[in-house]
Amino acid sequence: MDKAVDLGGFGVRRASESESDALIGIDTVAIEGDTGRQASIRKWCREGLAVVAEDASGLLGYCVVEHTFFEQGFLTLLMVAPSARGKGVGCRLLDAAAASCTTPKLFTSTNVSNQPMQRLLQKAGWSPVGLLHGLDEGDPELFYLYRPQTPAQ
């Protein structure tokens, strides 16, 4: 996924290392000064793990898939710029995440309080598979599973 793929007004492609500052600029956590998130974004861009959605106005969002969750794919982060929300960017990034996954299962998680992400995941065909208490006090983490469709044999 090195070249941009035009998907209805915006494209999806792998981010370059030089785009880490631009991703920080659309990440609502990183832009508030979270140095851990900023360092992660730089690492993901350097390692070629970040996939961006963009249109003529610039970057709209990004996602990161890693394969370190019990040797399965894990959507580590999906971020859509506030100005681009509700326009299909999140769905397209979820599609790109599924396409980039090299394992039979792709997991992700979100806080129980993050209702917009839960609606997005369910709309995109992800299934809730578990709940974990203790990561964020008072806001459990809800895990989801996506099984990419395999062609009929």
Image (cartoon, rainbow, N blue to C red):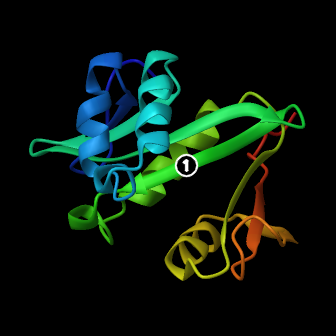
Residue drawn at point x = 69 percent, y = 69 percent: 136
Residue drawn at point x = 23 percent, y = 36 percent: 22
Quarter assignment of residue 46: top left
Q: Secondary structure at mark 1?
A: strand
* 90 vs 38, nearest the viewer: 38
Q: Quick check: 2 above or below 105?
A: above
Q: Quick check: 117 above or below 97?
A: below
Q: Which residue is mark 1?
A: 77
Quarter assignment of residue 66: top right
Please count the marks in the image.
1
* 5 vs 35, nearest the viewer: 35
* 11 vs 145, nearest the viewer: 145
Quarter assignment of residue 120: bottom right
Residue drawn at point x = 57 percent, y = 41 percent: 97
Q: Quick check: 52 above or below 131?
A: above
Give the image location of residue 153, x and y in percent. 87, 33
Q: Quick check: 96 above or below 90?
A: above
Left of 135 or right of it: where is 33?
left
* 10 vs 63, nearest the viewer: 63
Q: Amino acid at mark 1?
A: Leu
